[in-house]
Image (cartoon, rainbow, N blue to C red):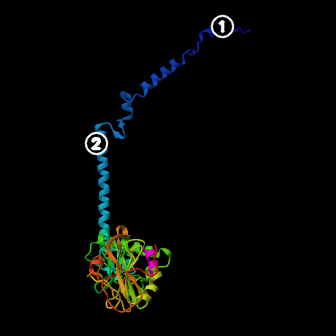
Amino acid sequence: MLDAPEPDYASDFSAPRRSSSPGRMRRDLAEDFADTYEEDSPVARRRGGVRLRLRGGLPRTRWGRIAAGVAVLLFVGVCAGAVMIARNALMHDDRFMIPSSAAIEVQGNEHVTRAQLLSIFGEDVERNIFKVSLADRKAELERLPWVDHATVMRLLPNRLRISITERTPVAFVRQGNHIGLVDANGVLLDMPTDVQANSKYSFPVVTGIGANDPVSVRAARMKIYQRFTSDLDSSGEKISRSLSEVDLSNPEDVRALIPDHSSEVLVHFGEDNFLDRYRKFEEHLPEWRAQYPRLASVDMRYEQQVVLQMQPGSGVPVAGPAPATAASAGANASVTPAPSRGAGGHPSAATGSAALHKQPAKASVVRPKPAAKHVPVKKPAHQTLYHPPQVVHP
């Protein structure tokens, strides 16, 4: 019969008891592991070798910084050497040699000939493509009058491409006996041979600008021209194409020659309201032409009157530089003071011009008025002020 185990054996075995304070256990374990993995301990240095302590991505020790500097220098030296070797190979490789002018492509040229463009690249033929300065060639191309913008590109292994944007002419320009072209910026352009043959352009001749004028002056006057033509063409009728010549010598008075049957009439448009003044001129021109067949000039700058000038020797009343007189073939005309233009182009009551009022025909006799009754005429010689039979209202 077996005896039951004595309770003493169970009492001798004592299991570890949990501490009533878990925080204490965590502190003990942390202290143990901290002692095991301390980096500065001799055991850690023996097991892991020399450790580099980095601060902000850089070694914290002197030897570490020296090693990093040497590595960077070696890397830069290797890269520089590779670049030099590659550059030397490219500069002396026959595959990158421009063989002939046929290897230079040209795009965008219409008036500038290919020969004119290739003359700038004459020294680059049979030359290494990497030795061609693209910036220098671009600047030389843009010095050509017709070239507004240029681009030069390398096409490996041995080709060049030239792309240009040409200037757009907006008018013919008269300089003495020479007729050329001019763009919106006042740059004077030579007349290409194809334009002379095909009469490609249709716009007026501009006077009042010359090669001796600064570019800024030419540009300012061409802005006036563009404003003038844009105003005339604002209705969509392309009136500017009917003009023969535009004089820009006086920025405050744009003058234009307008064809009228077999002759031309010089019209003073002033500096604004161009389309409105042209409409008035166009409306009353048949009436004026019927009364004055030798009409030469019309000044439309006045609001309530129009200034008419006849051709020299036409036998029509003309006011000369002396005290105003009037003469008419088959009619007498009296000269009376008329308002002159004040500020802004409007007539004022001040003196300065005279007007011819038509009177019934009597005889072909010139009867000058007494000088004391006349106001000095401030208009140029051979200019007549005339009230049309139908007053033109603005």
**Rendered-image quadrant of the N terminus:** top right
Three-letter code, disc 1: Pro
- The residues bearing labels 1 and 2 have C-alpha atoms spaced at a distance of 74 Å
Q: In terms of image quadrants, where is residue 92?
A: bottom left
State the residue in front, 119 or 275.
Answer: 275
Residue 187 visible in the snapshot: no
The boundaries of the magenta stretch are: 274-281
Tell me if mark 2 has few (under 14), some (14-19) or many (20+) residues whose alpha carbon lies within 10 angstroms of its own.
few
In terms of secondary structure, where does tag 1 sit?
A: helix
Label of residue 7 in the image: 1
Residue 242 visible in the snapshot: yes
Where 80 sits versus 317, above or below? above
State the residue in front, 235 or 87.
Answer: 235
State the residue in front, 351 or 207.
Answer: 351
Label of residue 66 in the image: 2
State the residue in front, 330 or 207.
Answer: 330
Q: Residue at x 29, y 39 (%)?
A: 63
Residue 206: % across, % down: 35, 80
Q: Residue at x 29, y 50 (%)?
A: 73
In terms of secondary structure, where does tag 2 sit?
A: helix
